[in-house]
Amino acid sequence: MTPKSPAVLQVRDFACERDGRRLFEGLDFSLCRGAAIQVKGCNGAGKTTLLRTLIGSNSDFSGEILWCGNPFPRALREMRESLLYIGHRGGVRAGLTPLENLTWYGADPESALQALDRVELYGFEDSLCHSLSAGQNRRVALARMFLPLAPRLWILDEPLAALDVAGVAALEKQMSAHLDKGGSILLTSHQPLALAGLDFIDLSDFAVEKSFVDIGGEHVID
Ligand SMILES: Nc1ncnc2c1ncn2[C@@H]1O[C@H](COP(=O)(O)OP(=O)(O)OP(=O)(O)O)[C@@H](O)[C@H]1O
């Protein structure tokens, strides 16, 4: 697969707000087939907000989002059919077992067991998730990346959080395989990721400028 083939997701002149506060503006990028982008930025820069906006869970934005050349909101439904989103919390239901969590997402039991095996949760498939460790719960969430016929666009918020070294390596390998098959990945991470051809967006570069005005010895943020 040649990287930088057609763009699946495009963002143009993009700005996001939370509670009336503008987080970043002037963001433009394209995510192509076979390509991965890591969104970087300090705590509170707006990384999660950006991802949640792109999946249609935050409407406080301006600018344009296109899926395969078609603009949102019309194309949102089509995009979601091709989307695997794993958020901060991972979408793991604590009162269910790992196996039940994966079948809840539509996996057949045999594929679910194989995926759980790939994330080293063999033997824990019938334990309740609230009895698992943070890293094991993260693995339950990430097991969705190991199911057959995984969607082609992966949007992952801090997928490496709580994973041990072996878990990170397994995830990097799976991401690489996904890219080789023409899939696309947009992710956030505070940790470095070993992924060939990974591009970066630093939201700090798009932060809204704050001007400091000195009034009577006090600094006021305008
Ligand atoms: N549920 C919420 N309600 C209101 N404002 C929020 C909410 N979540 C986040 N924010 C605001 O949006 C800003 C951006 O938050 P966001 O979670 O997108 O940042 P982030 O870059 O992902 O941070 P981190 O690296 O800490 O995960 C925060 O500083 C906060 O002020």
Image: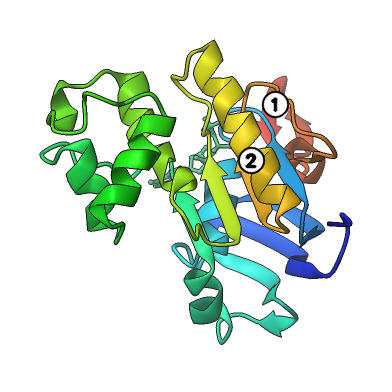
Between 218 and 173, the one lying in front of the other is 173
Determine whether label 2 and label 1 are within 8 Å by CB.
yes
State how far apart marks 2 and 1 are (Cα): 10 Å
| Secondary structure of the residue carrying numbered label 1 | loop
Q: Is residue 23 above or below residue 82?
A: above
Q: Is residue 83 left or right of residue 220?
A: left
Identity, as a three-letter code, of the amino acid under mark 2: Met
Question: Which image quadrant: the N terminus?
Answer: bottom right
Q: Is residue 52 left or right of residue 100?
A: right
Say if disc 2 is inside 8 Å of ligand 1: no
Residue 104 image offset from top left, x and y in percent: 22, 56
Please give the residue where the numbered disc 1 appears in the rendered image. 193
- Residue shown at 29%/26% (left/top)? 122
Residue 175 is marked as: 2
Q: Is residue 2 left or right of residue 182?
A: right
- Residue shown at 39%/40% (left/top)? 115
Total marks shown come to 2
Residue 17 image offset from top left, x and y in percent: 57, 56
Of callouts 2 and 1, the N-terminal one: 2
Identity, as a three-letter code, of the amino acid under mark 1: Leu
Residue 101 image offset from top left, x and y in percent: 23, 46
Label 2 CA crowd tier, 10 Å (few <14, some 14–19, many 20+) = many
